[in-house]
Image (cartoon, rainbow, N blue to C red):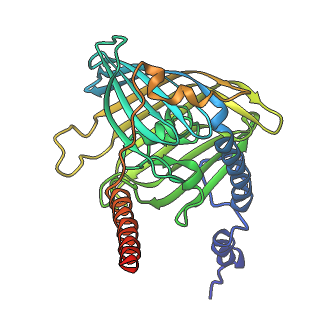
Amino acid sequence: MNRVPVFFLVWPLMINFGFCQAPSEYDNSIPIPKAREMLNAARVQWVLAEQKSIYVQGTIRHQSAGIVGGISTVNNEGVADWKHNKTGGVYKTRTTIPKEKSEVLVYNSLYFAMLESPGGSNRWDLIFLDWIKKGQDPPVSHSRWNLTKSIPDFARPYVYTTGAGNLIELVEHSDFEIKAAKLENGVLSIDFESYFEHPSNKGGVYDILGGRIELNESLKWFPQKVEINLGSSDRVIYSKTIMTLKYRDMASDDTYEMPLLERKTVSWKGVKQTPGSTSPPDYAVIQHTDMDLIVVDKLPADKEFRLSAFGLPEPVRPQSMSVTWWKWGGGMLVAGILFALIAVKLGRKK
């Protein structure tokens, strides 16, 4: 009887428990537990950068284009700049494509407001204003709130999809699994599989199914390229997102250094026809964002995040009905007590 060598019986178990690296295209592969350890250390750097992001301010220039049949058409182009402190912020944009328009999102400890200036004029019109309850953040129901609360998603190197894709959350997800990894010339490449449901498209075809992350040691293990496979809950891949990053230099303060982005390119490409979609399966979108970022030592004053900074009068907060009725009822109660005392006093005099 032919006996199977013990090696071939033990090998699958060694791979399963992480003692050996599964065969892959990598020449300089490293054990998966080591890759996980390095990825965890990188995530610590991203979290530190997120905490310091309030001191990162600047200007971004962005352009996005749709590509069908190899023909590219620019569908959005503009410039944005922002600043903020610990209680307020302002995000100002000027769009040139599809039409020229300027917009401001501003918030402070009292209110959140949106202003528009049609045609790029210097006159600002108030579009809406929401009052903020004491001790609460501005209402998250506004889709652009993330743009003002801290550094915009455009300028965050670990965000690969605005409002939805964040490496800080992805690598900690319970379904995130490293399948292979290599370390070469100071670059850590990780292939992974996952099932991470898209927060704003539940049950759709944009759930994260896997991909590849490349981290650079010279950039404190910040990402230099991220590839994401997007698909449905039955693990069918419908599209891919690829983000490439170029950094300018390292910015520092007294406690921490972080790399500052210079250019961020995010492309989305269809792989399979989306159910119910009229777009061709090879439809693609590519967005380029160039940045001029700085780390400030002193945060802006609160007065810069008021309507008056844009030539508009400061709003007067209306009293709530509950407060009005409480005051009215309290006043009537006091008046009733006074009338009763006066009546008793007059009765005694008689």
Vertically, is 329 above or below 213?
below
Residue 236 placement, left or right of 302: left
Q: Residue 256: where, in percent of width, then height?
A: 79, 38
Q: Residue 235: where, in percent of width, then height?
A: 37, 61
Residue positioned most to the front: 350
Q: Residue at x 38, y 78 (%)?
A: 344
Quadrant position of the N terminus in the picture: bottom right
Residue positioned most to the right: 254
Residue 162 in view in this figure: no
Vertically, is 16 above or below 37?
below
Question: Residue 97 sits in which quadrant?
Answer: top left
Q: Residue 75: where, in percent of width, then height?
A: 29, 23
Question: Residue 13 sits in which quadrant?
Answer: bottom right
Q: Residue at x 33, y 54 (%)?
A: 201
Vertically, is 108 above or below 191?
above
Along the viewing direction, whichever of 45 and 303 lies nearer the viewer: 303
Question: Residue 19 sits in which quadrant?
Answer: bottom right
Along the viewing direction, whichever of 250 and 130 lies nearer the viewer: 130
Along the viewing direction, whichever of 171 and 102 lies nearer the viewer: 102
Quadrant position of the C terminus in the picture: bottom left
Q: Residue 249: where, in percent of width, then height?
A: 71, 24
Q: How many marks?
A: 0
Residue 189 in view in this figure: yes
